[in-house]
Structures are given as structure tokens and as C-alpha cells.
């Protein structure tokens, strides 16, 4: 997964692309290592091609490749896992879970790390399906075998949602002790903030800032932290520098626009988003940003058009944010019927998105 896509929660709008290829690439490298001793050049080449398509988010091609291998009974455990990842990235959580289960059933001879990795994916699918108790049980089992920061965070996240803030705090502290990745600290802070417990997360945010200062080249990370601290001028400077060094960093595009909007500078936000519309890797994020500008300016028809164009980009990393913003636009238009339908569909697709669940509950009373 990307560095934060699964284990660090669903802060996709800010952090998902922090390691767009990082976590998935790690998984793919693990798979390659597992398969390094396999024979049969043609099936191996087909498997590697499917993995490459998965890494590059060409999901239809990846799915076809993995299904062909499964039909030939080649690389069953690896191919079922690949199918699961492709389904997961497209928010098809039930289908993803089925494939992860099949991967485990066909994992005889696989290394323990491979099986543990698939179990992590399966636990996350259960959580995204709204099967929270099952997910927590799986995290408990995984943590019994080995303490890992990402798993402690995910279990803490569930505990927080259940109101068990003491257990959540213990897991968050344990997770923080096991990682030098300040993104974890930011994720913990934002989770506390989401539950109106900013003070409890303040220490994590400060630690993230201290850690990021030791990584002078990570301007995006510093921008995220400064944004979280509401130091918008500092965030803007860091994000502009990040984009100067890496024009294709869509994470920074989205966050810089949000920073401008937080500074009530919709004009600069809009200009910046438009600049990146022609960049395929940033287009969906840019349309989403333009929709947020439209929302701030109460131009709801334009917001819907931008959301429509953003959705047409088929960028799974921004899809959830676009669909949520679509609900908000219809609410502002007082089109309660459409908003209610959209919210119900969103809640069913993203059962762990608490903001979406709140909107669905609110609209169900309209």
C-alpha cells in the first residue's frame, strides 16, 4: 500500500500519495523475492507483467493477467493477492477479501512474511466493509505474533471509534515508539483532532515537527505539519518548494490549494489547480480542488461539473474525496433527494468514513 493508504488510515486527501509506490512497491518486491526461485520463464514473465500493471494502477490489465495465471494454476497465492490488491484499490472490499482468503488457502510453501502480509490486507478489508469486530480480532491476532507500528495504529483507530480512548492512547504510544516515520505521528494527531481531542494529539504533532526538521529535503512533510498546525504561510512556502523540485507531486498540489483556501485566497488556489489540469497524475486532484474553490465561492453548478470531470479521471486516490464533496455540493444546493441517494451509496461503499456516515445519518432525517 502506499505508505499511509491502509495501515495509517484514510487520510488520502493529504497523505496517500506520500509513498504512492512505496508500500505497494515494497509488497511487489516481497513477492518478487518470494518468487525468485521459481521456474518457468513464461509464467514468471506474465506474473511480473501483471505486477507491473498493478504498480502502475492499470487495474483492468493487472486483473486480466492475474486471472489468466489463476486459470493456468500458476502462482496462485501471489496472483490471488494481486487480484485482492487491485480490488482493494478500487474500493471493491468484498471482492478483495475473497481473493485474500483464497491467497491464504493457497499459501502452502510460502514464507511467513507473505502470509502475514496477506492477513494485514484482509484485516483492512474487513474494517472497510464495516466488519469492525472481525477486523479488530484479526489485528489482535497479528499483534500477538509480532508488535508493529502500523497494526497498533489500526487497532487504536478502532478503539478510538468505539470510545475506548485509553486503549487507543496506549496503542498509539506503542506505535510511536516503534517508528521513526513522522507521518505516523501526524496520522495519530489528525485522528485525535477528528474526535475533538486536539490536546491529546498535540505531543504527537510536535514530535512530527521535530522529526521532520531533521529531514531538510522533505518539504512536503513539513508542509503537512505546518498545515496541521495552521501555520499556513509556512505551509505554503514548504509546498511551493516541494513543487519546484517535483512538479508531479499531486499530494502537494492538493494540499497547497487547501492551504490557499484556508488563507481565504481562492483566486490563487484556483490558478494553481488550473495549472495542473493538464498533468495526468494531478488532474483528478486539481478538479477536486477546483470544486472546493467553487464551494467556497458558492458556485455549486461549477462545483458539480468539476467533480464530474474529476471522477472521469478514474483516479482511485481522489475518488473518495470527490464523491464526498459531491454530497456536500448537493446539500448546499438543498437538493436533499439527490444528496440523500448519494450519501447512502457513499456510506455503503465507504463504511469506515466517519464524515460520510454522519452525512448519511443527517440526510436520512431530511
Image: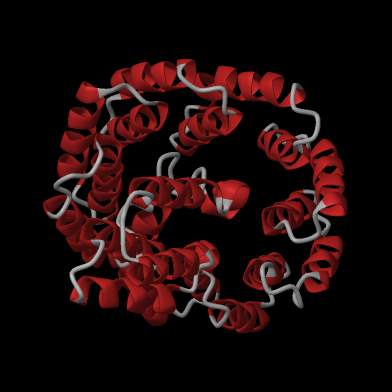
Query: Could you say where residue 136 lies in the image, as x and y percent from the top left?
Result: 21, 36
Examine the image and state in which quarter residue 265 appears.
bottom right
Q: Is residue 26 above or below residue 275?
A: above
Which of 18/163 is in front? 18
Q: Residue at x 78, y 70 (%)?
A: 276
Taking 137 as reference, is 86 left or right? right
Q: How many marks on residues?
A: 0
Q: In the rendered image, is residue 130 in sight?
A: yes
Above or below: residue 330 compared with residue 97: below
Q: Would residue 366 be seen by someone viewing this image from the given angle?
A: no
Answer left or right for 228 relative to 314: right
Give percent across and percent down for residue 355.
42, 53
* Nearer to the camera, 195 or 99: 99
Q: Residue at x 15, y 43 (%)?
A: 134
Residue at 34% in and 46% down: 34
The C terminus lies in which quarter of the figure?
bottom left
Q: Position of residue 235 (x, y in %)?
A: 79, 40
**Quadrant hosting residue 250:** bottom right
Q: Nearer the viewer, residue 296 or 183?
A: 183
Q: Residue at x 58, y 79 (%)?
A: 313
> Is residue 295 toward the left or the right of residue 42 in the image?
right
Q: Position of residue 199 (x, y in %)?
A: 54, 21
Amino acid at each position: 500500500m502506499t505508505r499511509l493508504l491502509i495501515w495509517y488510515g484514510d487520510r488520502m486527501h493529504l497523505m496517500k500519495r506520500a509513498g504512492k509506490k512505496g508500500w505497494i512497491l515494497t509488497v511487489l518486491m516481497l513477492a518478487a523475492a518470494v518468487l525468485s526461485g521459481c521456474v518457468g520463464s513464461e509464467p514468471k514473465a506474465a506474473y511480473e507483467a501483471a505486477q507491473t500493471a498493478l504498480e502502475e494502477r492499470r487495474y483492468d490489465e493487472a486483473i486480466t493477467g492475474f486471472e489468466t495465471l489463476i486459470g493456468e494454476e500458476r502462482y496462485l497465492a501471489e496472483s490471488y493477492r494481486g487480484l485482492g490488491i487491485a480490488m482493494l484499490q478500487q474500493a471493491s472490499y468484498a471482492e478483495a477479501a475473497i481473493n485474500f482468503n483464497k491467497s491464504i488457502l493457497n499459501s502452502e510453501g510460502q514464507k511467513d512474511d507473505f502470509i502475514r502480509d496477506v492477513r494485514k490486507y484482509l484485516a483492512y478489508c474487513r474494517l472497510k466493509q464495516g466488519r469492525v469486530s472481525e477486523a479488530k480480532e484479526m489485528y489482535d491476532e497479528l499483534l500477538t505474533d509480532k508488535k508493529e507500528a502500523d497494526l497498533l495504529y489500526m487497532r487504536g483507530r478502532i478503539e478510538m471509534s468505539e470510545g475506548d480512548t485509553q486503549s487507543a492512547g496506549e496503542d498509539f504510544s506503542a506505535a510511536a515508539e516503534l517508528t521513526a516515520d513522522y507521518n505516523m505521528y501526524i496520522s495519530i494527531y489528525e485522528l485525535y483532532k477528528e474526535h475533538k481531542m486536539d490536546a491529546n494529539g498535540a505531543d504527537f504533532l510536535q514530535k512530527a515537527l521535530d522529526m521532520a526538521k531533521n529531514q531538510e529535503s522533505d518539504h512536503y512533510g513539513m508542509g503537512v505539519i505546518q498545515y496541521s498546525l495552521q501555520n499556513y504561510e509556512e505551509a505554503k512556502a514548504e509546498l511551493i518548494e516541494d513543487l519546484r523540485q517535483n512538479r508531479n507531486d499531486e499530494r502537494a498540489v492538493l494540499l497547497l490549494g487547501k492551504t490557499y483556501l484556508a488563507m481565504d485566497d481562492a483566486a490563487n488556489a484556483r490558478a494553481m489547480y488550473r495549472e495542473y489540469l493538464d498533468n495526468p497524475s494531478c488532474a483528478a486532484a486539481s478538479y477536486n480542488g477546483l470544486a472546493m474553490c467553487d464551494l467556497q465561492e458558492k458556485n455549486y453548478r461549477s462545483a458539480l461539473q468539476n467533480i464530474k470531470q474529476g471522477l472521469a479521471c478514474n483516479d482511485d486516490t481522489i475518488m473518495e474525496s470527490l464523491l464526498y464533496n459531491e454530497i456536500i455540493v448537493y446539500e448546499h444546493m438543498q437538493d436533499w433527494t439527490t444528496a440523500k441517494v448519494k450519501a447512502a451509496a457513499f456510506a455503503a461503499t465507504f463504511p469506515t468514513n466517519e464524515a460520510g456516515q454522519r452525512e448519511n445519518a443527517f440526510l436520512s432525517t431530511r
